[in-house]
């Protein structure tokens, strides 16, 4: 499964790695300054599995509807079957919803809490990380994931999911389905996928990085945003609100064509603008926003 051409490393979510590019002529839109380029981030295996937690207590549910509360320590909570209400405590908790439509909170009360890992499991689940830097997996079903405070990482999983980062610098990843991603406040990274469905991406406040896949729709909204496009061959990503006065656009191209790539921007019959590489469309802009072809940065990516 392709996540907008990326692989995400859960172990290094809070940091980004920039590969050195070969020297290119700055005049043709290529830039090898690591500070000026987006991360070739997250290269995970889709739906990575975190390490087994080091816990102080294990709290088990049943196949019925359970209400389970964590402690002040590091808890492992398993809901089992049924639609459960599961709440962590003050520690770094790991919570598995299991089957059923579950309501899972990383912390029992809003405010300061641990760095929690939440798994929705099967069913249409509602997950809220709340305090701390949390890791949320929607898994199967049409899930709603809310990061809350802290720098959170959200994976939608299968189904049509809603991912909201809220506060902090969050990473939101759509892995399948027609998902709705909203970064909220902070400098967020939003990543789509190359399936036939449309992922709706809203950066929100802050200076966000949006990496739409095939058929995705990306809107940066407030802040100086970075849009990263690729040639997918499976459909065009659409950028809604590019503004050259504050936003940037980068193309990740195969290293074999990047050096000699000819980038053009032309108006389509419907009044939108097509960004093309060697005559082949790679993205659509609802308005040009003052973008010029020579302003587009190219990053060579090795397969």
Image (spheres, rainbow, N blue to C red):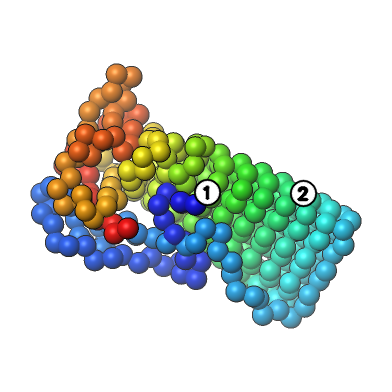
Circle 1 — which element? loop
Where residue 277 sits, quadrant-wise, is top left
Dot 2 alpha-carbon crowd within 10 angstroms: few under 14, some 14 to 19, many 20 or more: many
- Left or right: residue 109 versus residue 226 is right
Which residue is rendered at x = 53% and y = 50% of the image? 175
Q: Position of residue 279 (x, y in %)?
A: 21, 34
Residue drawn at point x = 38 percent, y = 65 percent: 16
Residue identifier under label 1 = 174
- The residue under the point 71% across, 79% down is 55
Q: Residue at x 79, y 51 (%)?
A: 100
Picture disc at residue 105: none
Q: Are marks 2 and 1 in contact (CB under 8 Å)?
A: no
Query: 114 or 145: which is nearer to us?
Result: 145
Q: Residues within 10 Å of mark 1 (few under 14, many from 20)?
A: many
Q: Is residue 15 left or right of residue 94?
A: left
Q: Nearer the viewer, residue 149 or 55?
A: 55
Q: Is residue 36 left or right of residue 220?
A: left
Disc number for residue 101 = 2
Is residue 65 rendered to the left or right of residue 268?
A: right
Q: Is residue 289 visible?
A: no
Helix, strand or loop status at disc 2: loop
């Amino acid at each position: 499964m392709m996540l907008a051409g990326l692989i995400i490393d859960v172990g290094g979510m809070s940091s980004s790695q920039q590969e050195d590019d070969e020297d290119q002529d700055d005049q043709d839109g290529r830039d090898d300054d690591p500070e000026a380029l987006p991360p070739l981030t997250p290269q995970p295996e889709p739906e990575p599995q975190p390490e087994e937690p080091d816990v102080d207590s294990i709290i088990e549910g049943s196949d019925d509807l359970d209400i389970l509360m964590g402690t002040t320590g590091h808890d492992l909570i398993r809901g089992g079957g049924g639609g459960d209400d599961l709440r962590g405590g003050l520690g770094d908790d790991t919570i598995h919803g299991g089957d059923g439509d579950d309501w899972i909170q990383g912390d029992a009360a809003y405010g300061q809490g641990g760095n929690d890992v939440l798994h929705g499991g099967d069913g249409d689940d509602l997950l809220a990380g709340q305090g701390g830097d949390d890791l949320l997996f929607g898994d199967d079903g049409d899930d709603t994931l809310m990061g809350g405070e802290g720098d959170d990482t959200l994976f939608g999983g299968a189904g049509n999911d809603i991912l909201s980062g809220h506060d902090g610098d969050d990473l939101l990843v759509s892995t399948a389905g027609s998902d709705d991603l909203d970064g909220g406040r902070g400098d967020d990274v939003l990543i789509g996928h190359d399936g036939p469905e449309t992922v709706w991406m809203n950066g929100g406040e802050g200076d966000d990085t949006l990496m739409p896949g095939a058929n995705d729709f990306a809107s940066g909204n407030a802040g100086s945003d970075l849009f990263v496009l690729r040639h997918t061959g499976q459909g065009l990503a659409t950028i809604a609100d590019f503004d050259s006065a504050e936003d940037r656009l980068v193309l990740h191209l195969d290293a074999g064509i990047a050096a000699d790539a000819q980038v053009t921007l032309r108006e389509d019959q419907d009044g939108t603008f097509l960004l093309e590489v060697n005559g082949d469309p790679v993205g659509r802009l609802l308005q040009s926003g003052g973008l010029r072809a020579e302003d587009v940065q190219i990053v060579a990516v090795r397969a």
